[in-house]
């Protein structure tokens, strides 16, 4: 059997298993049959089955625990296009979930040197620091650490009035619309990002380190949003 034929067979098996997963015949957390059993079912060798499972693993549809078996992954709570300039709350709502938010901090202070450099502002810039826990149907999906220059707000601004979506507050209370985001994306492993009773169980995050600007190219917020791996997934659309 040629390598081309083996690849075609592996792809055919991967497509058959993918169909079962998307159709709900195989559900999140369910263990797949052994390589030997799948080989007998599809009348192929174990290496060919292994190639099919690797394809599904690359697609994020299964995960393999060595010595234990291969399991169907649980779909993320929220999916969002990373190229979109939209609030996290809006993305959660579009996923058919109810967004929620808990503010852990609202503090007015001066920027730190590294923040000043990242934001491109002077060291005497005053900011409102926010720390937010973001949920979808009550399940935590992200933690966000935000800095907003106080020059964005009116002089009599009371930080306690800022609740819910920051983007929503910008548009409804300040008539500011974020239109441009310049972001860096990083994979983070840390047990110091989150808080709450389950925080010690979460260590893997996708960090969106983002500067956000309004229509006048004014910096209105610097955010470091940590999305919990497996609960909030980003989709990238690429075209030739």
Image: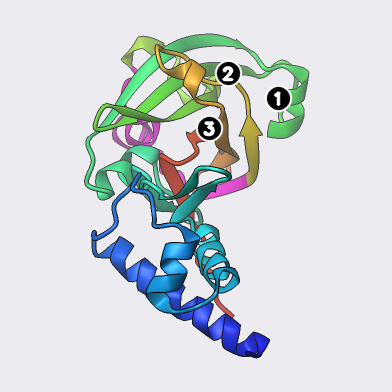
From the viewer's perspective, tell me whether residue 215 is left or right of residue 188. left
Q: Report, in whole angstroms, how far the alpha carbon at label 2 lies from the one at label 3.
A: 20 Å
Question: Looking at this view, is 234 or 10 the one in front?
Answer: 10
> Is 83 rendered above or below residue 112?
below
Q: Foreground mark, 2 or 3?
A: 3
- Cα separation, mark 1 vs mark 2, equals 10 Å
> Disc 3 marks which residue?
226
Which percent across, then down, holds residue 185?
63, 45
Question: Dot 2: few (<14), some (14–19), or many (≥20) neighbours within 10 Å?
Answer: many
Tell me which numbered mark, 1 or 2, is placed earlier along the sequence: 1
- Residue drawn at (59%, 83%) of the image: 6
Residue 101 x, y percent position in the rendering: 33, 24
**SS for tag 2?**
strand
Judge depth for marks 1 and 3 and give the one in front. 3
- Residue 135, by quadrant, is top left
Q: What segment carries the magenta color?
A: 162-183
Q: Disc 1, disc 2: CB below 8 Å?
A: yes
Residue visible at 27% across and 49% down in the picture: 94
Label 1 vs label 2, nearer the camera: 1
Q: What's the mark number on residue 127?
A: 2
- Of pointers 1 and 3, the one earlier in the residue sequence: 1
Q: How is the image coloured?
A: rainbow
The image position of residue 31, as x and y in percent, is 38, 49
Mark number, residue 115: 1
Q: Is residue 223 left or right of residue 96?
A: right
Magenta stretch contains residue 177: yes
- Residue 222 in sight here: no
Local crowd at mark 1 within 10 Å, few (<14), some, or many (≥20)? some
- Check residue 146 for magenta coloring: no
- Front-most of 19 and 98? 19
């Amino acid at each position: 059997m040629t390598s081309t034929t083996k690849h075609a067979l592996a792809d055919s098996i991967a497509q058959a298993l993918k169909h079962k997963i998307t159709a709900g015949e195989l559900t999140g957390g369910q263990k797949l049959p052994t390589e030997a059993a799948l080989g007998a079912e599809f009348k192929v060798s174990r290496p060919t089955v292994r190639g099919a499972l690797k394809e599904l693993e690359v697609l994020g549809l299964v995960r393999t625990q060595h010595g234990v078996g291969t399991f169907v992954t649980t779909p993320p709570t929220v999916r969002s296009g990373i190229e979109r300039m939209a609030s996290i709350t809006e993305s959660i709502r579009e996923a058919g979930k109810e967004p929620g938010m808990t503010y852990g901090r609202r503090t007015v202070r001066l920027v730190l040197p590294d923040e000043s450099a990242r934001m491109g502002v002077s060291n005497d810039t005053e900011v409102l620091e926010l720390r937010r826990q973001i949920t979808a149907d009550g399940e935590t999906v992200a933690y966000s650490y935000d800095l907003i220059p106080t020059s964005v707000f009116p002089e009599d601004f009371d930080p306690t009035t800022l609740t819910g979506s920051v983007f929503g507050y910008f548009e409804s209370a300040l008539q500011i619309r974020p239109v441009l985001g310049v972001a860096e994306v990083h994979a983070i492993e840390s047990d110091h990002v989150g808080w709450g009773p389950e925080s010690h169980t979460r260590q893997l995050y996708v960090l969106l380190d983002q500067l956000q600007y309004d229509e006048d190219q004014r910096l209105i917020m610097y955010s470091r949003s940590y999305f919990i791996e497996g609960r909030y997934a980003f989709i990238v659309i690429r075209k030739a």
